[in-house]
Image (spheres, rainbow, N blue to C red):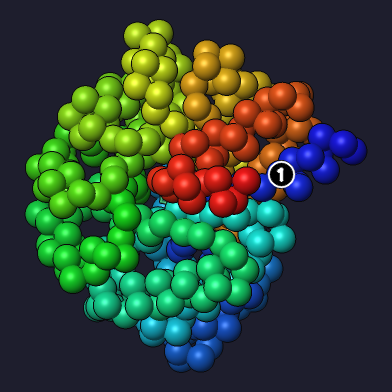
Amino acid sequence: DTLLNLAYQMPKTELHLHIEGTFEPELMFAIAKRNNIPFKYDSVDALKSAYQFENLQDFLDLYYQGMSVLLKEQDFYDLTMAYLKRVHQDNVVHVEIFFDPQGHTSRGISFETQINGIYRALKDGEQQLGITFKLIMSFLRHLSESSAFETLELAKPYLDWIDGVGLDSSEVGHPPQKFANVFAECKKLGLSITAHAGEEGPPEYVWEAIETIQVNRIDHGNRALEESDLIAEIKKRGLTLTVCPLSNLKLCVVPNMDNHPIKSMLKFGLNATVNSDDPAYFGGYINDNYKALIKDSGISKNELYTLACNSFNGSWLSSEQKSRHL
Ligand code: HPA
Ligand code: ZN
C-alpha cells in the first residue's frame, strides 16, 4: 500500500511521548525480577489483559504502578534505549520526550538517578542511531504547585540537559492556572513550555495554557475544536498540537478512528502532528498511529506530508538542526 509505505518511510519526529509510557510488559517483568520486586500480575499476558481503559484515570493508575519497578539508573537507561531502538525502525529521527520526575521522587528515587539514566541513553542513541533529542520535564498536575516548585529546584543542576517543561496526569479539576507561578519561573529560566490541555478537560483549559502559561505548544488539544475563537487563536499564534490518535481511542477521548479530529485540525490550518503518547499501553508506536489514520480516517497523501512537515516545524530544533535531518 503506497500510503502506508510513504507514512512508514517519511523521516519524522515524535513530540508527545512519555518515556514511562514506553515500558513494555516484557521489560517491566525483567526489571521487576532483577530488582526483586514482587509483581501483582503473574504473566505478561495477565498484565496486558488489564490494559482496557474507560478514561485517562484508569490508564494513569496502571501507568504509575508500572513505573514503580524502576529503581536504578540502569533501569531508566534500559527503558529509554529500548524506546529509541524501537522508533529507529519507524524512521523517527528526532524525539522530544517527557519524563515524570515526581512519579519517581515520590517513591524515593532521586532526580539524579532518573535523569542520569535517561540522558545517557539519549546521548548513546544520538551517537549510535542518529536520533537527536530534547528532554522535557513534566509536572504532575494532580500534585500541588509547591511540589512542582520542589521538583524545579531538584532540576536546577541539570538545566543544561533539560529543554522544556510540561504538564501531565489527571486533567479535569487541575487547570493550567494552578501552575501559573511555577511556569512563570520556568520561563525566566529560559525553558520551553508545553502543557496537556483539552484531552479530557474543557476548552477553558486550552485558553489558560495559551494565555496564562504562555505555552510554546499544546499537547492533545482535541477539545479546542469546540470553540471557533479558540481555533482562530491557535492558528494566529501558529501553535503546534501534538495529537495522539491511538491514545485518544484507548482512553475513549474519541469513539472511533473514522472521524478523528486531526482531519478537522488540518482543514482549519492548525499545525497538528501525530504522536504515540504511551505506546506500550495504547497498542502502537508512531507508525501504528499513522496506519490507524490511513486505514480508518481516509487521510490523504498531502495530509501525510503535512503531518511529517509539522512534526519538524513544531519541534524545538533550530532551523539549522532541522535542515540537517531533511
Ligand atoms: N495525559 C495525561 N497524562 C499523561 C498522559 C496523557 O495522555 N500520558 C502519561 N501521562
Ligand atoms: Zn501525554
* As drawn, 22 above or below 292: below
Q: Is residue 275 left or right of residue 117?
A: right
Q: Tell whether circle 1 marks a residue whose Cβ is less than 8 angstroms from ligand 2.
A: no
For the image shown, how many numbered marks are present on the structure? 1
Q: Nearer the viewer, residue 86 or 317?
A: 317
Q: In this view, does 209 lie to the left or right of 287?
A: left
Q: Specify the farthest residue to the right.
A: 1
The answer to whether residue 307 is seen in the rendering is yes
Q: Nearer the viewer, residue 239 or 17?
A: 239
How many other residues sit within 10 Å of disc 1, few (<14), some (14-19) or many (≥20)?
some
Seen at 58% across and 38% down, the residue is 274
* As drawn, 257 above or below 154: above
Q: Specify the farthest residue to the top.
A: 228
* As drawn, 127 above or below 185: below
Percent coordinates x, y for residue 115 in the rendering? 34, 72
The answer to whether residue 230 is seen in the rendering is no
Q: Nearer the viewer, residue 177 or 266?
A: 266
> Looking at the figure, which quarter contains the N terminus?
top right
Seen at 42% across and 72% down, the residue is 118
Q: What residue type is labelled 1?
A: Met
* Quarter of the figure with residue 219: top left
Seen at 40% across and 72% down, the residue is 119
* As drawn, 106 above or below 58: below
* Quarter of the figure with residue 108: bottom left
Seen at 52% across and 16% down, the residue is 269
User: What residue did someone put label 1 on?
Assistant: 10
Secondary structure under the numbered disc 1 in the rendered image: loop
Q: Is residue 312 left or right of residue 211?
A: right
Percent coordinates x, y for residue 4 in the rendering? 81, 40
